[in-house]
Amino acid sequence: MPAWLTSQEDSCDQPEGSVPSYPAAWVSPRPKSDQELSGWPEWSHYYHSKLSRGPVFVEFPLDVLYPYHLVKREQLRAQAAKGLVGNMVNLYLGNYVANLFAGAWEPRDISPLPVRVPHATKSQVQQCVELISRAKKPLILLGSQVTSPPTPIEVLRAALEEMRIPCFLGGMARGMLGKNSPLHIRQNRREALKEADVVILAGTVCDFRLSFGRVLSRRSKVIAVNRDRAQLLRNARVFWKPHLAIRADAGSFLVQLNKGLKGYSCPQEWALSLKETDRVKEKINSEKAEEVLELHLNPLKLLCQVDRLLPEDSLLVVDGGDFVGSAAYIVQPPQPLSWLDPGAFGTLGVGGGFALGAKLCRPESEVWILYGDGSLGFSVMEFDTFVRHKTPVIALVGNDACWSQISREQVPMLGSSVACNLDYLDYHVVAEGLGGKGFLLSRQNEEQMDDVIKAAQSECRNGRPALINALIGKTNFRDGSIAV
Ligand SMILES: Cc1ncc(C[n+]2csc(CCOP(=O)(O)OP(=O)(O)O)c2C)c(N)n1
Ligand SMILES: [Mg+2]
């Protein structure tokens, strides 16, 4: 009997290139007695105290899960066995059940254990204050960890807005600065990192997403902050060198830093120059979005339209490969904690479950799932759940009849598209079959793109989950990005 331990914060508050956030831990307890089983809060404590928070997978064997009388009944049934071997088995089972439940009824303290969140020391904060106040081109890279308690997200946002240091947002930190913030830099991170004189890695880890730290310049002073020591120093002194490595909660650290900087405001020419690079790149993107493809819809155009029509309280769940990788550059989560994605390893299949959790936690929000057609296959059945449990969400499927993210590298590398090709299936009919409302969006009704999106939103507002099956063609937008 497996169970994922997540909290409300995790399920709805989540959210480069669709590859952010949480390491998962697997706990498979096999308690020898019920006494040990009642140590259960300690496993849950493992989740709550984990320095780098994320889901914990707890798997209970059935005999541990069922109550005493049921397990005893099963054991008595097994006692029908006769003969020497039978008697030995009976003895063993009787002993096993007695041990399993020994002491089960003794009262014990099961109150939650205290959570210990590491914080930066005053002198560490002071060292950073000195570095930042002298910096001309500081940069902050925020990772998912900054969204974890104890620092409320709005307090952190206010601190960032006061410091006015340009920020790149990754993982669940997306949306942290709302839409169109002058501090939020979205493009050309590699170039910005080359120029920066001080870089704060706030919960951002030097794994494959930062080319294991190789994107950091040796000329920049790097301040790494992370609750978890292993994440803090991942690949350090191999591909990058921290000037300061602080084991502390990244969000709280930034708030302390702002307090220490008292009235400091980052030189604005730096943010302006980065914003200008953003503007140029985004202009190129919007020109790309206007290109007419040989076949089917331009996915970038579709994503631009969705971005325009998203209400302020929408919440985005993304589940897929290239389509959602493009979405990560085009669709802007409107506010903090409005982006949920499959985490660092891009584990497909999370979409339906995440959306369900998100909608249940925030019923007033318009919950969108941006799906690839391949990933849709993992959780399209959840439309049944959405319908039966009256949790209306909108699924937008970028249907390119392919596992494009895989075939993009597999075909040039191996000369074969084996196992990557799908068909342009009628996923909108599947949604209808499960009680939802389905829409087909293709070149034939491209002119009505806005109307279709609005109709899906209206269905959702009226309580019916909707799926837009958008037939999309190929672009070179994702060429060169990681494909695994
Ligand atoms: C559970 C799981 N299996 C396999 C993968 C590897 N993988 C990454 S992207 C991808 C293809 C996804 O296809 P689709 O959802 O259609 O997205 P597209 O790239 O076509 O936009 C696969 C199989 C994964 N990330 N997670
Ligand atoms: Mg696909």
Image (tube, grey):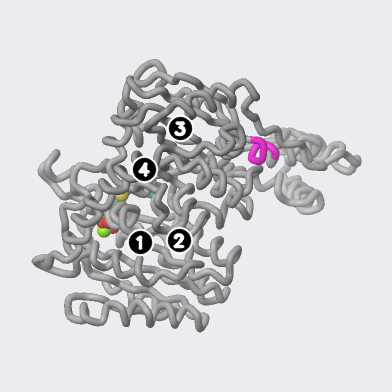
Closer mark to the observer between disc 4 and disc 2: 4
Distance from Cα at disc 4 to Cα at disc 3: 17 Å
For label 4, the residue is 271
Q: Which residues are magenta?
A: 45-49
Q: Earlier in the sequence, mark 2 or mark 1?
A: 2
Closer mark to the observer between disc 4 and disc 3: 4
Q: Can you say which quadrant of the picture contains the C terminus?
A: top left
Q: Residue at x 60, y 63 (%)?
A: 361
For label 1, the residue is 371
Q: Earlier in the sequence, mark 4 or mark 2?
A: 4
Q: Earlier in the sequence, mark 2 or mark 3?
A: 3
Q: Earlier in the sequence, mark 1 or mark 4?
A: 4
Q: Earlier in the sequence, mark 4 or mark 3?
A: 3
Tell me residue 249's x, y (percent): 59, 34
Would you say the beta carbon of the disc 1 residue lies within 8 angstroms of ligand 1? yes
For label 1, the SS is: strand
Contact (CB < 8 A) between labels 1 and 3?
Answer: no
Tell me residue 190's x, y (percent): 28, 35
Distance from Cα at disc 2 to Cα at disc 3: 23 Å
- What main secondary structure does the magenta stretch of the protein show? helix
